[in-house]
Image: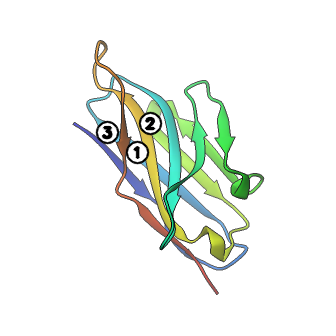
Amino acid sequence: QVQLVESGGGLVQPGGSLRLSCVASGDIFSINGMGWYRQAPGKQRELVAGITSGPRADYADPVKGRFTISRDNAKNTVYLQMNSLTPEDTAVYYCTADIRPRQWASARTYWGQGTQVTVSS
């Protein structure tokens, strides 16, 4: 089985920073793309950033220039550095990973349980 566990969420003032981490564990042969989504109250879940195994990173327009996604393949971990946070960034943040559990198995997408980020004064 595979688990994704996020950490690093919390309450921060506008203009502040947070760093989210997500560790994948369990039956892992390889990890392809990893990413972060968020869901604010009353809104649909949206992609925040993604990173390939290359790695190549892509960002949603609202976070470009403020957020940075990175990964540590040796640790099966993806990070999201969030700077210049605004109240509009308040949401539950979820990490995802496309994981192949065995060499000849198909990859599937796994989700973490989510971590709350609240930006408020």
Judged by depth in the image, the label closer to the viewer, 2 or 1, is 1
75 with respect to 120 (left or right): left
Q: Which label belongs to residue 25?
A: 3
Q: Which label belongs to residue 75?
A: 2
Amino acid type, mark 1? Val
Q: State yes or no: discs 2 and 1 in contact (Cβ < 8 Å).
A: yes
Residue visible at 58% across and 51% down in the picture: 80
Q: State yes or no: discs 3 and 1 in contact (Cβ < 8 Å).
A: yes
Question: In what element is the residue under mark 1?
Answer: strand
Vertical order, 44 against 104 (above or below): below
> What is the CA distance from the residue labelled 3 to the residue labelled 2?
9 Å
Q: Which is nearer the eye, 109 or 13? A: 109
**How far from the left and from the top, in percent, is residue 85?**
68, 69
Compare marks 3 and 2 and give the one earlier in the sequence: 3
Disc 3 packing (10 Å; few <14; some 14–19; many ≥20): some
Viewport quadrant of the C terminus: bottom right
Amino acid type, mark 2? Lys
Disc 1 packing (10 Å; few <14; some 14–19; many ≥20): some
